[in-house]
């Protein structure tokens, strides 16, 4: 219990407000956070601590550059932005504040982190650990009203969105997240410092990135030649009038309907769906229909079941022959006795060589065999004669 008004003033003086964040890079969201911190601290002092983590993904600005930038961008808070390389975490900050003689502390954070820090800070109060020791009489965690400006999913221009803009080379979008008092030259400077920290080259020319509305899918298909063609039948929207395409323009077509030509926009007409004709089914012979491929019934008409199998084997064998090989067109079993439909091979051969070509070919082959046999016999006779002559010479 406070014994006197003087003691009350001393106790009040020992209260401090602070915040801790990455602020990499500093944004308008961080400006709101610091303004709220100053407002809630009232007549008490307040401090701004920032992390010292450095990496290419989330922390491109080094500690010294970041503190210098924050002080320049937020001049009315510059004296409260701390520069102490010993303070690397929120626990280091609390230890330093406690060692400076403060007995009460209030941390101001984004609304989404109040509960997290309230549990964490009080958990280690009075506990000596690697960061040292802090033992406050009172610890408060207060909401700044908005979400943490360092959060990836925060609405508006967050630090993560600014890093993304810097990575994409979009200076215009990056600059939209900076306070209004920041000059264009200072904006370009921190923009390139962020890019360098991300391992990217410095950008010397700055262009506004234009974002165009996507062209309609129908127009894209038309330009690629995948929508309308000359001669296509179409319907006119709204009237269901039938027309045919006679000419193709840049973004329109000329159609003919009732002997008259009309100019229509792509959105005014629709292509009539072409009906696909179903392939005609050929009746299969019931005795051999399970065989691979197609076995049309006319090919086996009037043929005995046993002969059908032979006929099937014949078709399978001779279908592998070249088209210019006469043997490929040899009559199939059943051709002589049954009234069957000649196979395509038989018909083709007859067109190429005539009806009696097979018999002619056979006779020709027989004649050639006979001639070869006679030649071979003569060669043997000559060899015998030479052998006898050689023996006679040897005996003489």
Image (tube, rainbow, N blue to C red):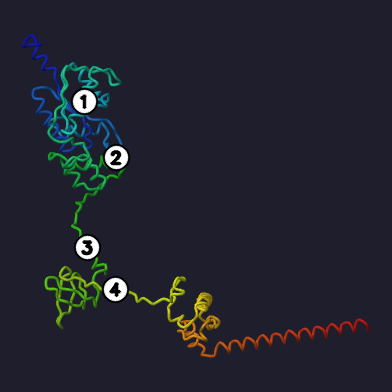
- Determine the CA span between mark 1 and mark 4: 71 Å
Q: Is residue 46 above or below residue 360?
A: above
In-front residue for pair 381/304: 304
**Mark 1 or mark 3, which has the lower sequence index?**
1
Disc 3 crowd rating (10 Å Cα; few below 14, some 14-19, many 20+) is few
> How many numbered dots are placed on residues in this image?
4
| Placement of the N terminus among the 4 image quadrants | top left
**Mark 2 or mark 1, which has the lower sequence index?**
2
Furthest-top residue in this view: 3
Q: Which residue is mark 4?
A: 276
Label 3 sits on a secondary structure element that is: helix
Q: Identify the residue at horizontal 8%, vertical 22% (top origin).
A: 43
- Determine the CA span between mark 2 and mark 3: 36 Å
Residue contact at pointers 2 and 3, CB within 8 angstroms: no
Taking the image as shown, residue 197 lies to the left or right of residue 268, namely: right
Q: Which residue is mark 3?
A: 217
Taking the image as shown, residue 131 lies to the left or right of residue 347, namely: left
Residue contact at pointers 4 and 2, CB within 8 angstroms: no
- Determine the CA span between mark 2 and mark 1: 29 Å
Q: Identify the residue at horizontal 11%, vertical 32% (top origin).
A: 35
Label 1 sits on a secondary structure element that is: helix
Q: Which residue is mark 2?
A: 57
Callout in the foreground (2, 1): 1
Disc 2 crowd rating (10 Å Cα; few below 14, some 14-19, many 20+) is few
Q: Position of residue 372 (x, y in %)?
A: 69, 85
Q: Position of residue 167 (x, y in %)?
A: 26, 45
- Determine the CA span between mark 3 and mark 4: 25 Å
**Residue 119, numbered label:** 1
């Amino acid at each position: 219990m406070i014994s006197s008004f003087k003691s009350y003033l001393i106790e009040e003086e020992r209260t401090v407000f602070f915040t801790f964040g990455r602020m990499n890079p500093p944004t308008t969201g961080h400006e709101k956070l610091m303004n709220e911190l100053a407002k809630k601290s009232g007549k008490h002092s307040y401090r701004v601590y920032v992390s010292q983590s450095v990496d290419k993904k989330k922390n491109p600005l080094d500690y010294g550059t970041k503190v210098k930038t924050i002080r320049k961008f937020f001049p009315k808070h510059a004296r409260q932005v701390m520069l102490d390389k010993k303070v690397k975490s929120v626990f280091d900050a609390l230890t330093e504040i406690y060692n400076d003689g403060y007995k009460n502390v209030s941390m101001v954070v984004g609304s989404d982190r109040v509960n997290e820090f309230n549990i964490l800070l009080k958990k280690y109060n009075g506990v000596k650990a690697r960061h040292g020791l802090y033992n406050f009489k009172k610890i408060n965690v207060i909401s700044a009203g908005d979400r943490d400006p360092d959060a990836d999913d925060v609405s508006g221009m967050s630090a993560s969105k600014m890093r993304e803009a810097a990575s994409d080379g979009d200076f215009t979008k990056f600059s939209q997240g900076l306070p209004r008092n920041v000059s264009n030259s200072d904006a370009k400077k921190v923009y390139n410092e962020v890019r360098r920290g991300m391992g990217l080259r410095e950008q010397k020319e700055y262009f506004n990135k234009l974002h165009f509305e996507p062209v309609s899918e129908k127009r894209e298909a038309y330009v690629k030649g995948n929508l309308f063609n000359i001669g296509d039948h179409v319907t006119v929207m709204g009237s269901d009038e039938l027309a045919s395409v006679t000419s193709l323009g840049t973004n329109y077509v000329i159609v003919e309907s009732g002997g008259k030509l009309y100019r229509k926009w792509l959105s005014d007409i629709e292509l009539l769906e072409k009906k696909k004709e179903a392939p005609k089914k050929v009746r299969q012979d019931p005795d051999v229909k399970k065989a691979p491929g197609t076995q049309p019934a006319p090919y086996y008409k009037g043929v005995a079941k046993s002969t059908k199998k032979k006929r099937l084997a014949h078709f399978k064998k001779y279908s592998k022959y070249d088209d210019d090989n006469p043997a490929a067109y040899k009559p199939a079993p059943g051709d002589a006795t049954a009234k069957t439909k000649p196979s395509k091979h038989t018909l083709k051969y007859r067109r190429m060589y005539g009806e009696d070509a097979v018999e002619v070919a056979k006779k020709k082959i027989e004649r050639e065999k006979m001639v070869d046999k006679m030649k071979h016999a003569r060669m043997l006779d000559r060899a015998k004669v030479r052998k006898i002559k050689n023996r006679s010479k040897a005996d003489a």
